[in-house]
Image (cartoon, helix red, strand yellow):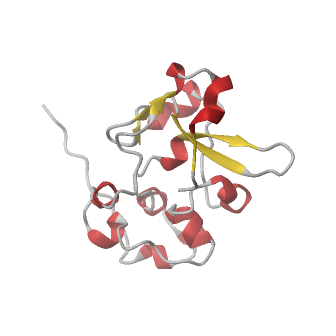
């Protein structure tokens, strides 16, 4: 038996409002479901430059691009960053360049393929903008080999 979850009440075009004014439901709805933020990253200690790898977090489902334990992720991955309107400006630099949170914080519009604009939750995958099908599980690649899996900025 499946249970029906009520659809959260979202204001029309809420993403055009200041991020600090969004309800928790609106904040969560900004996520396009690409899974890019769940890729492990490497930081150059000298320059501070961030490099994305194709190595997914241990909780990332590579087929759905969603966290397998989203509500409890901090219990499993203590270093997982919970993005909020308060900390966004401090950590947006390590978010992917296509991330709605980062784009809006930078005063840029949502990309045309974003599910909030298309009405299709799969539009991110159809546009080829997600990590669907090409990540490697974190436990299959030794950390000392992650540099071999660096990819271009997303």
The image shows residue 122, relative to residue 80, as above or below, that is below
- Quick check: can you spot residue 14? yes
The quarter of the picture where the N terminus appears is: top left
Can residue 87 be seen here?
A: no
Q: Position of residue 79 (x, y in %)?
A: 66, 33
| Nearer to us in this view, 43 or 34 | 43
Does residue 19 sit above or below 144 in this rendering? below
- On the image, the x and y values in percent for residue 103 come to 56, 69
Q: Could you say which is closer to the camera, residue 43 or residue 68?
A: 43
Residue at image point 65% right, 35% down:
147
Residue 12 x, y percent position in the rendering: 35, 77
Outermost left residue: 1
Horizontally, is 94 left or right of 68 in the view? right
Q: Quadrant of the rendered structure where residue 153 is? A: bottom right
Q: Position of residue 102 (x, y in %)?
A: 59, 64
Q: Residue furthest front?
A: 148
Residue 25 falls left or right of residue 95: left
Query: Residue drawn at (78%, 44%), measured in percent from left and top?
Result: 44
Q: Is residue 77 left or right of residue 16?
A: right
Q: Along the line of sight, which residue is nearer the eye, 97 or 2?
A: 97
- All told, the count of numbered labels is 0
Query: Quick one: 133 or 113, which is closer to the camera?
Result: 133
Which residue appears at 40% of the width and 39% of the height?
Answer: 134
In the depicted structure, whether residue 27 falls above or below residue 72:
below
Which residue is pictured at 48% across the width and 63% down the height? 23
Relative to 121, 45 lies left or right: right
């Amino acid at each position: 038996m499946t249970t029906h979850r009520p659809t959260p009440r979202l204001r029309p075009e809420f993403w055009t409002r200041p991020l600090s004014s969004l309800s928790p439901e609106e904040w969560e709805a900004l996520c396009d479901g690409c899974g890019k933020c769940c890729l492990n990253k490497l930081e150059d200690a000298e320059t501070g430059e961030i490099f994305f790898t194709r190595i997914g977090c241990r909780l990332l489902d590579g087929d759905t691009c969603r966290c397998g334990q989203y509500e409890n992720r901090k219990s499993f991955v203590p270093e997982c960053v919970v993005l909020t309107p308060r900390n966004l400006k401090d950590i947006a630099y390590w978010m992917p360049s296509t991330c709605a949170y980062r784009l809006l914080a930078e005063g840029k519009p949502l990309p045309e393929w974003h599910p909030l604009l298309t009405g299709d939750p799969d539009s991110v995958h159809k546009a080829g903008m997600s990590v669907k099908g090409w990540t490697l599980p974190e436990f299959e690649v030794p950390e000392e080999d992650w540099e071999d899996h660096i990819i271009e900025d997303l």
